[in-house]
Amino acid sequence: MTERSAGTAGAPDGNDAAVAIVGAGVVGLAVACALAPSHSVAVIERHEGPARETSSHNSGVIHAGIFYAAGSLKHRLCLEGNRALYDWCEARGVMVRRSGKLIVAIEPSEVDGLEVVLAQARANAVPGVSRLSGAQARAIEPAVPAVAALHSQSTGVVDAFGYARSLEAAAREAGVLFAYRHELTGVERAGGGTFRLALRGPDGAPAELRAAALVNCAGLRAHEVAAALGYSLDGAEGLPVLRQRVNRGRYYDVVSGPSARAVTRPIYPVPAHSGDLPAQLRSAGGLGVHITVDTDGAVHLGPDTEWLPEGAPLDYRADDSRRAAFLAAGQRLLPSLRDEEIAPGQVGYRPKLQRPGEEPADFLVWADRGYIHLGGIESPGLTCSLPLARMVAELLR
Ligand SMILES: Cc1cc2nc3c(=O)[nH]c(=O)nc-3n(C[C@H](O)[C@H](O)[C@H](O)COP(=O)(O)OP(=O)(O)OC[C@H]3O[C@@H](n4cnc5c(N)ncnc54)[C@H](O)[C@@H]3O)c2cc1C
């Protein structure tokens, strides 16, 4: 079942591992790295390798922490995670670029909105956010017709899959066991503080793993793992809300022509309701189509936002159904962009703890008798992965 036999060194009371982690996305992998020095750890992952879901279907932006409610986990962990992620990647040769980003006003009527964003950045103590005139903004991004902008110096981009591989390598080196192609199908408390995990292996054969603690890093399926353990999902009996909804984000890639190299850093529009940032996020579920530039310098548009009905299938294939909307949003920021320069890009899915129209929810990190639940780990979860792992390690200490 695992790559080493059961009865791992350091596993107490006849368990296979001290800690079982469900999910080998960046969060589960970071947790494995944080725990490995002091615990025997097994990671259960249904896919054939790390980061096959949300962790490799995102913008790869190292966020600065501007847009989150002051004092929230998203805000505090983003400040910490921003620094930690640069340090991790630079120490291990993972592709990362301290690109900075621009939030731009294209119309004079949007300039007031920049002040709201600046006030939020200051309330959040985000370092390196400064006001630029239109001329200053156009001097660094000449293809974008900004009339004014904010520059966020600490924003950057990372090769998210390379980062995941570096975490996996560090975890393996520290003795973590990986059970790829193993799906968690059931879990129960077996008494004596032990969790008994039912798994389905690559050939469909059932397997079992016993662990003294269970960390749920199952991303889009985190609530299913909690339900399997018997938790009610909708906030009954003093429990936090665990049920997640799904919001799809699609991208278009700028694949050819002069626009494919027209900008060098992420470019965000002023949020449409910047007088009330939570209202914007509430209505849309995201920040609105923007431009990102990955570590290779390739330019992407997106992600957009679309709430899915509960239980809708998650299809990672791209289609061309949003071309007109993406082209219009892209041309607003990059007027030279032409229809023939874009092609459908990747698709990602956000696990959300709020329903459509509700206030944006914070990350949930919740512990109950050896069980740790990470819920609603949408953006900026990549940026926050290392401090999320630190929190889990502190909870298990
Ligand atoms: C469109 C989009 C854009 C984003 N952009 C950014 C960004 O620019 N910057 C940023 O900081 N964040 C961004 N994010 C957020 C970031 O990608 C996520 O927060 C992060 O990847 C979450 O990682 P994870 O490990 O929690 O989840 P995942 O990567 O989803 O990993 C969960 C793993 O659990 C496994 N699993 C689930 N159930 C089971 C089971 N029963 N048995 C075995 N394995 C199981 C899954 O197969 C999966 O591999 C974005 C997200 C989206 C959707």
Image (cartoon, rainbow, N blue to C red):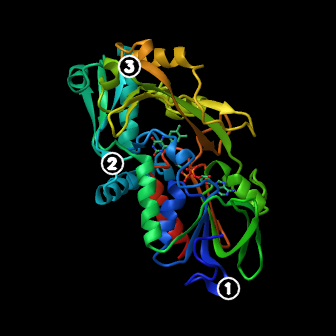
Nearest the camera: 328 or 63? 328
Q: Is residue 293 above or below residue 342?
A: below
Q: Quadrant of residue 259?
A: top left
What is the crowding at mark 3: few (fewer than 14 residues within 10 Å), some, or many (at least 20)? many
Seen in the image, is 368 located left or right of residue 185? left
Q: Secondary structure at mark 2?
A: loop
What is the crowding at mark 1: few (fewer than 14 residues within 10 Å), some, or many (at least 20)? some
Q: Secondary structure at mark 3?
A: helix
From the image, tell me which residue sits under label 2.
95
Residue type at mark 2 is Met
x then y, percent, for residue 224: 73, 53
Q: How many marks?
A: 3
From the image, tell me which residue sits under label 3.
333
Give me the C-alpha separation between circle 3 and circle 2. 26 Å
Residue type at mark 1 is Gly
Nearest the camera: 305 or 357? 305
Residue 311 appearing in the image: yes
- Which residue is found at the position 53% from the left and 51% from the top? 51
Give me the C-alpha separation between circle 3 and circle 1. 60 Å
Seen in the image, is 234 located left or right of residue 214? right
